Image (cartoon, grey):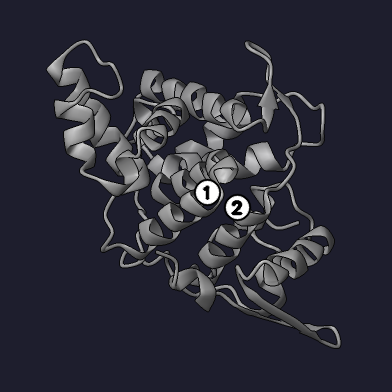
Amino acid sequence: MKFNFSNSKQELPGSVGFRIGPRGTHSSRTMMLDELVLLYSQQAFVGDVKQAIVEENVLGKSTASGRSLSLQRLTELYCFDNSIPIFRVFAGLCRRDPAALPQLALLMAIARDPLLRASAKPVLGLASGSQLMRDVPRNAIASVVGDRMNEAVLDKVVRNTSSSWTKTGHLVGRTLKRRAHVRANQTAFAFAIWLAHKAGFGGAELLDNGWVAALDLEPKSARALAERAHAAGLINFRTIGDAIEVDVAPLNRLN
């Protein structure tokens, strides 16, 4: 299983909606999954998110500054802009399969937050039941941010990313975090394939990369799920001997 999120020949394209660089939302927040679920339950994805959060206060924040900051951080993570391809696909898949929202949100947050993305390999590479040693994600995140963060902020990023991975079920425990494995949702898997395609992967690599690994899928099980996603009309998938062909065009037509 591979844990890379971009083809080595290119950077993640910002025009698609990926965010790169040494900064990310996890320096101050987690992936804010509870807030996102609440927004979706209030149908805020299809309306004016700013109005829902700031004016209608659907998140129940006690101050205006708290509402504005929540809007800023959620927008960093989830975009809420229909002109951006990554959000159109994300929102369309949420509408199609609301049960997939936690895993869709994880993939979106990885795409939009370089800090969470940096923490992925230390978590995903752990054997089931193994303890996450804080220095491992800390060093991985430090390699991305360089000297831009002091020790206290870096430690906070480790706490926040660990909390996000706990929210998604990849880690369990409060103080001591241990690896648990999740069951991949078919709709979220289709999004992982779309992201891998936009990140420059092709052929068999579409089933063996960080996006697919984030759903705890080995290439063999990813292949079986690709066949199911094809049957569901999410992607076009076929095999030619040992070679595979994947077309993500059906996802681009979601509305």
- Local secondary structure at mark 2: helix
Q: In this view, does 221 lie to the left or right of 90?
A: right
Q: Quadrant of the C terminus?
A: bottom left
Determine the residue positioned at 38% across, 18% down. 152
Q: Which amino acid does label 1 sit on?
A: Leu
Q: Which amino acid does label 2 sit on?
A: Ala
Residue 36 in the image: state x and y as whole percent.
40, 34
Residue 22 visible in the displayed image:
no
Taking the spot 24% from the left edge, 33% from the top edge, the residue there is 71
The residue under label 1 is 107
The residue lying at 68 percent from left, 55 percent from top is 186
Which callout, 1 or 2, points to the residue nearer the camera? 2
Question: How many neighbours does mark 2 have within 10 angstroms: few (below 14), some (14-19), or many (20 or more)?
Answer: many
Q: Nearer the viewer, residue 208 or 143?
A: 208
The residue singled out by tag 2 in the image is: 188
Number of residue marks: 2
> Disc 1 versus disc 2: distance between alpha carbons?
8 Å
Inspect this view and state whether residue 243 appears.
yes
Q: Indicate left or right for 109 with 166 as reference.
A: left
Residue 134, given in percent of the width and then of the height, sits at 61, 23
Query: Which type of secondary structure does the marked residue at label 1 adopt?
Result: helix
Q: In which quarter of the image is residue 189?
A: bottom right
Front residue of 155/146: it is: 155
